[in-house]
Image: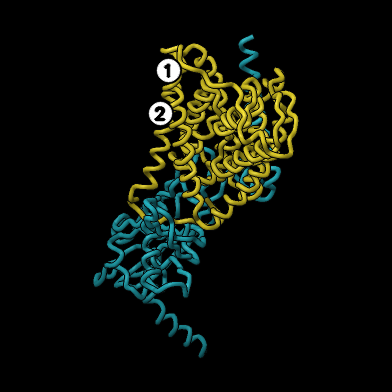
Chain colours: A cyan, B yellow
Amino acid sequence: MRSFAIFMVVLLNVLPLRSEEVIAGLSQNSVSLTVNFEGSEILIFGAVRRETAVPEDSELDVIIAIEGPPQPVVVWRKERRAAIWVNTQSQDIRAAPSFYAVATTRGLADILSQDADLTYRISPQLAIFEARGAGDASARATFTEALIRVRTAEGLYQQHEGLVDMQRETLFSTRLTLPKNIVEGRYTARVFLVREGQVIDEFETFIDVQKAVLERWLTNLAFEQPFLYGVLALALALFFGWGASALFRLLQA
Amino acid sequence: MQVYLPIAETSVNAFTLLGVGGGVGMLSGMFGVGGGFLITPLLFFIGVPPAVAVATGVNQVVASSISGVLAHLKRKTVDLQMGSVLLIGGLVGSLIGIWFFNLMSALGQIDLIVQLSYVIFLGIIGGLMLQESLRALRRANNPAANKRKLHQHTWVHNLPFKMKFRTSGLYISIFPPLLVGMGVGILAAIMGVGGGFILVPAMIYLLGMPTKVVIGTSLFQVTFVAAFTTMMHAVTNQSVDVMLAAFLIIGGVVGAQIGTRVGLKLRAEQLRILLSLLVLAVCGKIAFDLLWTPSEIYSVTVPGRF
């Protein structure tokens, strides 16, 4: 009886916080890097489930973030040395997402508090882990910014403020493009429901990006049986190189 | 139509690849050049990572030279003895080149090294070719101009460890061919070229070989060194992309057959000038990229990827 009372108290305390829940889905949960892969568009859609009326006192926003498998990277800075541009300084980054896209209903800074951003690591700056110790903090930040700029130019990092379309505070959707230069692995798609700067609910799902059968086989062979792969490359060259001239001779005769 | 390259991990237009392979193949059919020195930089321009472009370029060289070497072997216009000495040098050079290539990759400087080598060598070949073809054009207009002496004695002929090369009719030290072969091997590994453009003049002017065995012997050395270098790149840094190679090779072999037929019907001197201008243009573009202030001075590399 006592435990039931405690349960009720906890439930009453929790319920108001969980009064709005997010349910979301993706147009596809797997992407195959086939021979004619040129990028893939993913539709992310969802709805807000609520037991009570829509709260009127604050605005509801949605943030959608897709993150590719993190990798260690090196960021280089060029300098002019004897007339030519040479990589001179570098900064190791312990882990940076290979792909990162954030789409929101409105400007990210307007809808999300810094605390919440730090907790959930939503801004691209916060998704990147710098190596500790090396150099001073401001220099490291310059390299991190450069990483974001370079990858944004390559289409690997994307920020789409206002791209999430929300209808009647309930239904939302957006389209994000995975570019042709993405790497393989498990991509995490997170959907956040935000009110007054705080995350009130979160939904997480995955997208598996994998090379198709032939591409997978070639990559495995190249890395696991490099000698056999080399033999294959040479056999291909010899076959086509010799075969073509033999064929043309035959056609002429 | 895009084609996904599993090693480069990006996709490029399939027709662009066939066009690059076919265009360079045609040039190699017309002029008897291998074309590696054009394929590799053209691959940089269409966005293939330099390391993949070099390793795959050298794979393509195997395809473009194999039928030539078979034809020369049948006609017995290969000095197998000289070819073997050049080849030994070439294999050693290739190993040195691969070591240097992987070292520079680890230091993040391989793109620079490859680009610099191209600027230097394309500049030299393009310049010499232009000069040579202009001179040939002038000579064609003025047949009274003096001719070069066929066989000259230079310092090369006074070195120790002499060996008889019967087919070439030479009795020279084995060091010059070993060193020439080695230089070509280093270039093959770093630049993804066959190296015929260095080997052929070196054999004629430095070693004094008779011209009838020069092409066959150089093809013999280039084929084996390129095959060995492909293997070394595949084993040490996994940068050979067979999907990319397949498109280049198919374009290349078809282009070469067309080029051979077209080349017979055209006047070579003017075309040679065009080829030299093309080589100089590619050289200029790479040099420009190195000298011009880039719009983004930062770049990102992922260790273990290209």
Residue type marked 1: Leu
Q: State the residue in front, A159 or B218.
A: B218
The circle drawn on residue B137 is 1
State left or right for residue B302 relative to residue B297.
Answer: right
SS assignment at label 2: helix
Q: Which residue is mark 2?
A: B277
Q: Secondary structure at mark 1?
A: helix
Q: Residue furthest left?
A: A57
- Label 1 neighbourhood size at 10 Å, few (<14), some (14-19), many (20+)? some
Give x and y (percent) for residue B22: 50, 26
Mark 1–mark 2 Cα distance, whole angstroms, equals 15 Å
Q: Residue at x 51, y 60 (%)?
A: A71
Residue at (53%, 14%) from the top-left corner?
B261
Could you tell me residue B237's position as x and y percent?
61, 50
For residue A203, say whether it is visible: yes
Amino acid type of the residue tagged 2 in the rendering: Leu
Residue nearer the viewer, A244 or A196: A244
Percent from the top left, x then y, of residue B265?
A: 49, 11
Residue at 58%, 51% in the rendered image: B100
Q: Is residue A47 visible?
A: no
Q: Is residue A35 above or below residue B295?
A: above
Tell which residue pokes out farthest to the bottom in this image: A2
